Amino acid sequence: MIYVFLANGFEEVEALTPIDLLRRAEKEVQIVGVTGKTVTGAHGIKVECDLTASEIVLGGELEMIVLPGGMPGTLNLEKSEIVQTAVDFCNDRKIFIGAICAAPSILGHKGLLDGREAIAYPGFETQLTGAKISSSSVVQDDFIITAKGAGVAVPFALKLIEALCGADRSAKISASICC
């Protein structure tokens, strides 16, 4: 199970691209509405979520959580006790955490990037407390995967697939979308 958390003001490309590609990789993805069952993106696109944050179950089948960026979406994610609990749960168990654009700042504020290579949207690097700022647009350091922004949503999603399903599966999905 993969939870993709959406809060009002999320960056649509950063959320929907991983959802789409992970589902193409035949992963079970649940869209989790942090600010309600229907969430509105930064550019006015409304998404009907599969679950509200209060309906998630942390445990057994959880393979990954994904935190899209966008403003004020990132701030709304960070304010959520359930998102904070999910991040802690995954960190404690070394379950994959994907964060893109401004969202890696949530991990930085918690000290989870200390000593890790990470990247975020330009200008947010100072909020990646303790991180070694990467020159790559997408970077994986152990179970944490971070990415720069909307322009690398496809490579980010492919890295998430690689982490869960292996490089061959990621390459097949990449080829299927002519990437």
Image: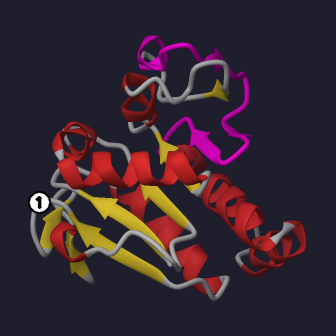
- Tell me the quarter of the picture where residue 155 sits: bottom right
**What is the x, y in percent for residue 62?**
51, 72
**What is the x, y in percent for residue 110?**
39, 28
84 or 42, which lies in front?
A: 84
**What is the x, y in percent for residue 122?**
48, 21
127 with respect to 158 (left or right): left
- Residue 127 within the segment the image draws in magenta: yes
Q: So how many labels did they put on this image?
A: 1
x 90%, y 73%: residue: 168
The single residue placed furthest to the bottom in the displayed view is: 26
Q: Quadrant of the C terminus?
A: bottom right
**Numbered disc 1: secondary structure:** loop
133 with respect to 42 (left or right): right
x 18%, y 60%: residue: 34
7 or 56, which lies in front?
A: 56
**What is the x, y in percent for residue 176?**
76, 81
Q: Identify residue type, mark 1.
A: Thr
36 or 88, which lies in front?
A: 88
x 59%, y 28%: residue: 119
Relative to 135, does residue 58 appear above or below in the rendering?
A: below
Q: Which residue is mark 1?
A: 35
**Observer able to see residue 42:** no
x 62%, y 44%: residue: 144
162 with respect to 32 (left or right): right
Q: How is the image coloured?
A: secondary structure
99 with respect to 93 (left or right): left
Range of residues picked out in magenta: 124-150
Mark 1 burial class by Cα count in 10 Å: few <14, some 14-19, many 20+: some
